[in-house]
Image: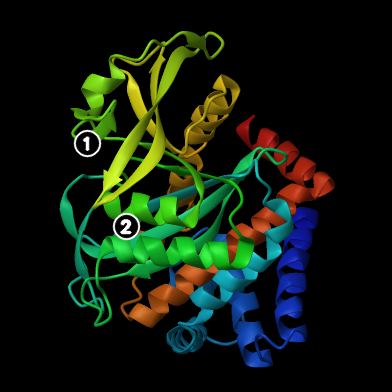
Amino acid sequence: MVSEICKKVKNKVVNFVKYLNKEGITDKPQSKFISELAMGMFLTQSCNLTEISRALREKISIKHTLKRLQRNLCKNGELLELMNDIVLENIKNKVDPETVIALDGGDISHLYGEKFENQSKVRDGSSKKIEKGYWLNQISCYVEKLKTSFPVLLDIYSQEEENFKSANDESIKMVRRFIEKIGKIGLWVLDRGYDGGIILEEFLTQGLEFIVRMRDNRDLIYKGKKINIEKLSLQINRRYKNGEKGRYGYLKCILRIGKIDYTVTLICYKGVKNKNPMIFLCNGHISKSREILRRIKGYFHRWGVEECYRFEKQGFGIEKSLVRSYSGIKCLLGMILLCCNVLLKIKEDDYLREMLIQEAKREKT
């Protein structure tokens, strides 16, 4: 059964690579490299090139396989951009107005790496300390039919790059790239940190549907007066129920950015297990409680983008990679995005998915 699963997974990878070659997206040497690296990552669950070289079991010495992979890795830094375009093209038909689209930042930190190219200081999401590494941006989609979140756009940036302006600028680039390919559909969900004027102005001027969790030090305009958002939220009557999970209420108010006033809806949600209410902001004036509840539920699917980051770090060990070149790291991220796309195709294959579930149950027992 294990060999049959391996064969079917390999076929998924091969078919995907054949598609790239057939469409003229990659040439034969690139296609061979992508196929080898993808299978090596699946076999080892790692981005470590030495482990991948060993897992490929070529007739030549491991050191020669390693040198070839290292050489090709540094030459294919554009693979990340390539995979972003392909994944966006492939998920077009999966995104609809009910799709939850999550934008979130992340990081790759190297505790002991001193000579990694373009390294900058980042806040490690795990240790909560300032470490050396790179910043990440990711957009993921939650599709109700598949009951899963999957990455559709992944980017890496560093303050050491010449064209770097700001983290907000990098986030806005991601949003615009998604809109250009997919359109202004779906519900965008954002966490605290994206509640500043620059990001909100972009979403409001683009006319996107969104829900963002707000920090309590922001101000809104209500009945012509400027008031702290936390004080305003405490005035909201949480008369609507989310089943047995919590209660919520909402009111219409104004968000002033610069000299422009935007109509927004403030939501106060208190879960059964929450000590303090959660404060959300949505675009426009929402008059139906059913729509408010849809957006609140959408926000809680935002955790899927965190799961994508966890999978990229733990499932493929990107932080343990010893690749020092910036283009090489970009190439590895592109390969991770490719592998996630293959895993999505496996999930859509009912027979193969069931085989994997059964094999996982056997391993646990």
Q: Residue at x 52, y 10 (%)?
A: 241
In the displayed structure, does residue 337 sit left or right of residue 272?
right
- At which x and y percent is residue 247? 45, 12
Q: Amino acid at mark 1?
A: Arg
Q: Amino acid at mark 2?
A: Asp
Residue found farthest to the right:
351
In this view, the residue in front, 243 or 125, is: 243
Q: How many marks?
A: 2
Residue found farthest to the front:
224
Picture layout, residue 231 above or below residue 263? above
Which numbered dot is residue 127?
Answer: none
In the displayed structure, does residue 72 sit left or right of residue 184?
left
Q: Quadrant of residue 364?
A: top right
- At which x and y percent is residue 64? 49, 88
Picture layout, residue 57 above or below residue 97? below
Q: Is residue 138 visible?
A: yes
- Which mark sits nearer the N-terminus, 2 or 1? 2
Label 2 sits on a secondary structure element that is: strand
Q: Residue at x 48, y 57 (%)?
A: 206
Label 1 sits on a secondary structure element that is: loop
In this view, the residue in front, 73 or 87, is: 87
Q: Is residue 55 visible?
A: no
Which numbered dot is residue 107?
Answer: 2
Query: Dot 2 surroundings within 10 Å: few (below 14), some, or many (20 or more)?
Result: many
Q: Which residue is mark 1?
A: 218
